[in-house]
Image (cartoon, rainbow, N blue to C red):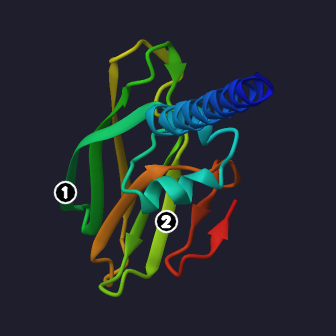
Amino acid sequence: LAAERQHLEARQIKKARARGWYALSAGIAAVVTAVFMFPQHIVPHAPGAMKLYEMAGIEVNVRGFEIRDIKQQHLIADGTRVFAVRGQVINVKGQDSKAPALRFILRDADKREVYAWTLNGVTNRSLKPDEATSFVTRIASPPETADDLQIRFAHASEIGLNADHDGRTNQ
């Protein structure tokens, strides 16, 4: 009888431990699933997670905007070379929001920055979900070595800044 009771208690302890391990596993699985399903909510609170998402091949859009339909044009105006860029910024956030400033970077063939500028006022009003606004920016006499254009959303420290041809920033 005592042996039977011991066996029963041992079995209950074993079941309780198994339930604990199942609960822990389910909790970890839920957290991992949430981390991969909602990266746009994780990165603002843990910016270092962005590198982990990049390593996993997951693109994270924390701003809720996309840059699309980019068109570049080289022309001559009054004898001066002009480089123009047109495109659209689209609100993909799901709520009304103001478009962030854009940063334009011209790079040479070795991908080194040779000129950069910021377009602060894409629009002065909030865009509704899925609404787009167009932008146009031009620079006169772009560097001869410019071979590549990169466009991204500006960091707070870059807003209101423009650059010389050698990449130094001026206000």
Residue depicted at x 53% and y 57%: 52
Where is residue 5 drawn, in percent x and y?
76, 23
Q: Secondary structure at mark 2?
A: strand
**For mark 2, does the 10 Å Cα neighbourhood hold few (<14), some (14 to 19), or many (20 or more) residues?**
many
Label 2 with label 1: CB-CB less than 8 Å:
no
Where is 158 relative to 164, above or below? above
Residue at the right extreme? 2
Element at label 1: strand
User: Relative to 149, is 120 on the left or the right?
Assistant: right
**Which residue is rendered at x = 72% and y = 32% of the image?**
10
Residue 157, position as x, y percentages in the image: 70, 54
Q: Which residue is mark 2?
A: 116
Q: Nearer the viewer, residue 78 or 58?
A: 58
The type of residue carrying mark 1 is: Gln
Residue found at x 29% / y 85%: 109
Which of 27 and 44 lies nearest the eye of the viewer? Answer: 27
Residue 73: numbered disc: 1
Left/right of residue 87 with respect to residue 60 in the rendered view = left
Q: Nearer the viewer, residue 124 or 70?
A: 70
